[in-house]
Image: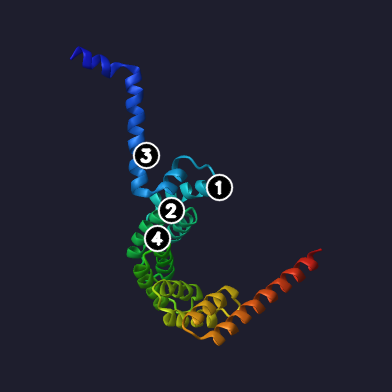
Amino acid sequence: MERAAAVLNDPDVSRRAHTVGIGLLVAGMLVLFGWPWVYGQFFDRSPQAREMKRLRAELAADPESLQTRLRLAELYRDAGGHRSARRLLESTVRLFPGEATVWYLLGMVYLDLGNTKRAEGALKEAARLNPDSSATYVGLGIAYRRSNRYEDAVQVLQEASRLNPDSAVIQDWLAESLEKTGLTEDAARARKEAARLRAEAEDKRMADKKAKE
C-alpha cells in the first residue's frame, strides 16, 4: 500500500497520467466530432475559428437562433467539419422543418459525406419549400448524377438553367448530363452557351476594371 501511495504521489507519474488523460479526451473528441472541429476548438487561432467560437457561444445563449445555426453550419462545412455541420443541421431541421435553406444545406452536407440517398431526400424537400432556388436544383442534379440517373439530372438542371440563365457552371453540368444520355447535339449547344456566358462575364469584368482606372 505504501509503495502504491508513493507511486501515486510521484510527480512524474502524475504528469504522465495527466498527459494520457488529455490524450484520451482528445481521441474521444476526434471520434465524436472529427479533426476539423477539434483543431478549430483548441489549436486554430484564425478569424474563421474565432468566428465559430463566437457563434457557438451565441448558440449556447440562444439555441433557437436560426441565423446563428445556419452561419455556424456553413463555417463547419467550409472548414471540412461535415459531421459537425450534419449534426447541427439535423437538429435545426427538427426545429425549423419549414425552412428551405436548412434542408438545402443539409442536403449539400449529405452530398459532402457521400450519402446520396439522404441528400436527394433533403434537396427534394428544399425544392418543394422553395421551387425558385436554382442552387437546390443543381444539388439535386449532382445527386442524380452520382446515382447514374442522368435523365433526371438533365430535367432538374434545365430547371436550374431556367431560373439562373447567366450561370456558365449550370450549363457545364447540363452539357455533361446531356452527353451521358446520348443527346450530343444538345450537349454541344449547352457547352457553347457556357463559353458565351464566360466570355460575356470576362468582357464585363474588363470593362469594369477599365472604368475604375
Splitting the image into 4 quarters, where does residue 10 fall? top left
**Reading the chain from its start, which is encountered first: label 4 or label 1?**
1
Q: Nearer the viewer, mark 4 or mark 2?
A: 4
Quadrant of the rendering where the N terminus is positioned = top left
Q: Is 94 drawn above or below residue 83 in the view shown?
A: below
What amino acid is found at the position of numbered circle 2 in the picture? Gly
Q: Which mark is residue 69?
A: none
Q: Which mark is residue 81?
A: 2
Disc 4 packing (10 Å; few <14; some 14–19; many ≥20): few
Q: CA distance from mark 3 to mark 2?
A: 16 Å
What amino acid is found at the position of numbered circle 1 in the picture? Pro
Disc 2 packing (10 Å; few <14; some 14–19; many ≥20): many
Contact (Cβ within 8 Å) of mark 1 with mark 2: no
Q: Nearer the viewer, mark 1 or mark 3?
A: 3
**Reading the chain from its start, which is encountered first: label 1 or label 2?**
1
State left or right for residue 121 relative to residue 163.
Answer: left
Q: Nearer the viewer, mark 4 or mark 3?
A: 4
Q: CA distance from mark 4 to mark 2?
A: 10 Å
Contact (Cβ within 8 Å) of mark 1 with mark 3: no
Q: Which residue is mark 4?
A: 113
Residue in front for this viewpoint, 122 or 30:
30
What amino acid is found at the position of numbered circle 4 in the picture? Leu
Disc 3 packing (10 Å; few <14; some 14–19; many ≥20): some
**Reading the chain from its start, which is encountered first: label 3 or label 2?**
3
Mark 2 lies on a secondary structure that is loop
Q: CA distance from mark 4 to mark 1?
A: 25 Å
Q: Which mark is residue 47?
A: 1
**Reading the chain from its start, which is encountered first: label 1 or label 3?**
3
**Reading the chain from its start, which is encountered first: label 4 or label 2?**
2
